[in-house]
Image: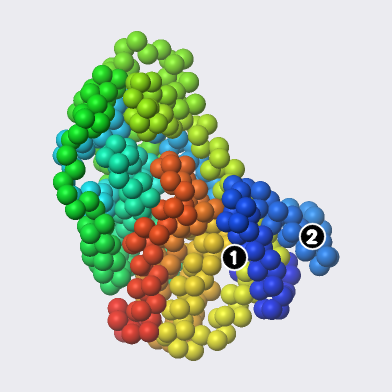
Amino acid sequence: MKLEDTNLKLSTIEAMLILSCVLLMIGTGIIYYGMNPHLPIIGAILLLFVYGGCKGLSFRVMEKALIQGAISGLGAIYIFFFIGLLIAGWIVSGTIPTMMYYGFELISDQSFYAVTFLVTSLLGLCIGSSLTTAATLGVAFIGMASAYGLSLPITAGAIISGAFLGDKMSPLSDTTNLASETVGVSLFVHIKNMLWTTIPGFVISFTIFYFLSPNVAIGKDNEITTLIQALEKHTFISLWSLLPFIIVGILALKKTAAIPTIAAGIISSVVIAFIGHPELTITEIGTILFSGYVMDSGVEQLDTILTAGGLESMMFSISLVLLALGMGGLLFGLGIIPSLLQSIAAKLNSTARLVSATVMTGIGVNFLVGEQYLSVLLPGNAYRESYDKLGLDAKSLSRTLEDSGTVVNPLVPWGVCGVFLTQVLGVSTLDYAPFAFFCLLCPLLSLISGFTKIGLHTKA
C-alpha cells in the first residue's frame, strides 16, 4: 500500500473523526467488554463499509482495498504456519525440553529476568528473527519461569525485549534491511547509527530486569526436581536434540530465507524425533505437526508448558492478522490514513516536530494497521523529503523508523507480532506490554533525540 492508493480525498477533521470511531469501537470491545479482538475489528470493518457506501464508493472497490490490505501480510502468515510446525517438532524431538533441562541446571540465580533478556538478545541478533527467538528459546524460558513460580508477564517482557533488540540490530533481520532500503542508507551504516538509542535502551532495560529479578537465589526445590525428573522420563533429553536449533542458527547466519530456514529446523527435528522415539509412526508425527504435541507426564505444570505447537494452533493468530490487515487496507482505500499523513507532513518545519511526527506515525500505523512492515514503509516514504529539506541525513530517518515501527508491533494486541507472541508464550499482550521495557524505551529515546539532536546527523 502506498499513500496514493486511495479512493477518497478527505479533510483532516473528517479523517480524524472516522478514525476515532474505529479506535473507540475496537478499544471498547477489547478492553471494556474483554472480547477477543476479532469481533471488534469485524465491527470496525463493517463501520468502514457503511461509511464508504455513504461516500459513494461501491462495495467492489472497498472489497479490493480490504483484500490488498490482507495480501500485505501473506508472507508473515506463511511463516506462522511453519513456526507452528517448528514448535511441535522441537518439543517432540526434545529441542525445547533439552533447553529447559539445561536451563534448570544452569540458570537458577537471582538474575533470571536479566539473563533471559540477555540470552534472547544474543539469539535474536544471531538469527535476525524476533518471532523465531520467542517461539523457541522464549518458550523454554516461559517454562522455567512457570516452574520457578516467577512472573510470566515479566518473563515474557524480558523475552520480547531481547528478541526485538536482536531483531532490530541484526543484519539478517528483514525489518532492518527494509528500513535501510526504504530511505537508501547502507545496511551497516544504519545498524551503527541505531546504537545511539539501542545502547541506552539495553542498559536501562537490563538494569530494570536485574532489579526485578528475585533478590535471593532460586534453589532447586522439590518441585523443580520433579520437573527435571519428568523431563528425563517423558522427553528426549540429549545434546543431539539441540541440532535443529544449531541448523536454524547457521542458515540464518548464511542469510537463508526465513521459510527454508524454519523448514530445515522442522525436518531435522522430525528426524531426531524418530531417533529419540523409535516407536513413533509417520501418522503419529503427522498428527503432532498438525494438531500440536500433547504432553502426558502426570505433572500438571509440565503438561501445560509442553502441550503446544502445531499448524492448528496458529489459526487464531492467522485469522486475526487477516482481519487487522484487511481493516488497514480499508483505512487506506478510504483515504483516512493518507489524509492524516499528508496534513502532518506540511507542518514539519523543525527537527523536533519532524522526529516526533515520525515516531507517532510509526506507532499509529502499528495500532491502526497492525503490520510491522507498513509502520516502516509508510512513514519512511511520507517523511523522506521532509528530512532532506531540514538537511538531516537519511540514516536519522531509518533509525527513527526502527525505534517506532519494528519494536512497537509486539505491544499491539491485534498486531501481527502481538497476536503471535500471545499465542506462543501464553501471556496476553496487555499483561506483558508494561514489562517489554526495551520496546517501550526505543520510541521515547527517539523523541529525546529529536529534541536534543543527540544522535541526529546532518548531510555532509
For residue 282, side relative to residue 74 (left or right): left
Q: Quadrant of the C terminus?
A: bottom left
Quarter residue 89 falls in: top left
Residue linked to disc 1 = 2
Q: Earlier in the sequence, mark 2 or mark 1?
A: 1
Q: Residue 399, relative to residue 152: is it above or below?
A: below
Tell which tag, 2 or 1, sits nearer the viewer: 2
Q: Is residue 217 left or right of residue 344?
A: left
Question: Could you tell me which residue is drawn at 33 percent across and 85 percent down?
Answer: 452
Labelled disc at residue 150: none
Kind of residue at disc 1: Lys
Query: Which residue reaches farthest top?
Result: 279
- Residue shown at 40% from the left, 31% from the top: 304
Q: Position of residue 312 (x, y in %)?
A: 52, 31
Q: Residue at x 26, y 66 (%)?
A: 204
Q: Residues within 10 Å of mark 1 (few under 14, many from 20)?
A: few
Name the residue beneath numbered marker 2. Answer: 50
Depicted 292 relative to depicted 336: above or below:
above
Helix or strand or loop: what does disc 1 sit on?
Answer: loop
Q: Residue 34: where, in percent of width, then height?
A: 59, 50
Residue 270 in view (yes/no): no
The residue under the point 42% across, 31% down is 308
Q: Residue 367 vs residue 152: left or right? A: right
The answer to whether one can see residue 18 in this image is: yes
Looking at the picture, the colour scheme in use is rainbow
Residue situated in front as seen by the camera: 207 or 256: 207
> What is the CA distance from the residue labelled 2 to the residue labelled 1?
23 Å
Q: Disc 2 marks which amino acid?
A: Val
